[in-house]
Amino acid sequence: MAKNQVQFQKGLSLPEFLRDYGSEQQCRDALFAWRWPVGFVCPECGHGGYCEIRSRRLYQCHRCHHQSSVTSGTIFEATKLPLTTWFLGMYLLTQSKNGISALAMKRQLGISYNAAWRLKHKLMQAMKERDDGQALSGTIQLDDAYWGGERHGGKRGRGAPNKVPFVAAVATDESSHPMAMRLSPVQGFRTAEIGRWARKHLAGDSRVVSDGLRCFGAVAAGCLHEPVITGGGPASVSEEALAWVNTMIGNVKKSIHGTYHAIGHKHLPRYLAEFCYRFNRRFDLKAMLPRLGYIAVRTPPMPERLLKLAEVRW
């Protein structure tokens, strides 16, 4: 049997990581290149001329004299951690197939749990915002799913207490291979809610295949909708038209359960987004860290009080 080229590709090895990002100056140079790919641009006036104040690691604009650094205005702003610690955290987050918990990151990085939690959630928020800005297109398999619920006793099924509903969508190519996915918690499976979700996450003229859940008819406003009546029970999971979305729902649940002891429901959007981010960029593992760094310097600062707020929308 031929090896899966995606699974057996070369990632970014630890020696390569240490060679490219092993010192504080190397990390600072990388942030500069990601933030200003064509050279310094003043965040205040847009002018390109600048001088470097090396003693304070600042860049001063020749026109307006505004001073900025490679971390100001980004998720790295006001951090007390060395940049090498941030970069190692990015490495662990992008090169681990199932991710890494804040507790494991604490041990690997040699920092406090609270610092590891903040670092991880800031990076996950950057991942989420990046994918949220890119709508799925082509042929899309759509299904409903739930996270959590009562494990012992109580009502089972869709009406079970303590369950978080989320929409699962997988975009496939002409050969029916999965290319990208989106997992988004929603307020409930109602027509208006799914309609709002579809307008944000699905490109117009996409072909959407879903089960017979009535609320999914809302996607027909901008896409070609093809409902498949699957019925209930095990047969509904084995439906060929929804094979990939059902597979990915199972994979993400196994991945999160295997990596994390427990996660707060209000932070579920970030954990789902982390899984999607790695899946959507799995074809080039070596480039995943620079790509995360590129969006991290374009994500605004997030104080801890904002990190701990519940995600209100998808």
Image (cartoon, rainbow, N blue to C red):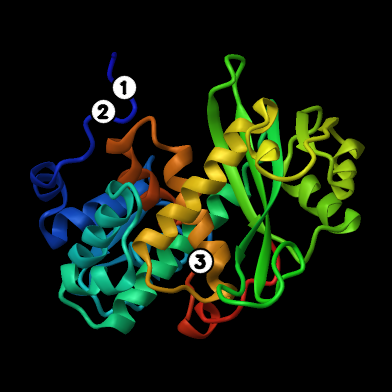
Q: Amino acid at mark 1?
A: Gln
Q: Amino acid at mark 3?
A: Pro
Q: Secondary structure at mark 1?
A: loop
Q: Which residue is mark 3?
A: 300
Mark number displayed over residue 9: 2
Q: Secondary structure at mark 2?
A: loop
Judge whether 112 appears above or below 296 on screen.
below
Q: Give whichever of 140, 79 is nearer the camera.
A: 140
The residues tagged by marks 3 and 1 sit, at their Cα atoms, a distance apart of: 36 Å
Q: Amino acid at mark 2?
A: Gln
Q: Are marks 1 and 2 in contact (CB under 8 Å)?
A: yes
Provide residue 106's location: percent of width, then percent of height.
23, 74
Q: Which residue is mark 1?
A: 5
Which class describes the residues within 10 Å of circle 3: few (<14), some (14-19), or many (20+)?
Answer: some
The residues tagged by marks 2 and 3 sit, at their Cα atoms, a distance apart of: 33 Å
Which class describes the residues within 10 Å of circle 1: few (<14), some (14-19), or many (20+)?
Answer: few
Judge whether 123 appears above or below 29 on screen.
below
Describe residue 15's horizontal placement relative to residue 153 as left or right: left
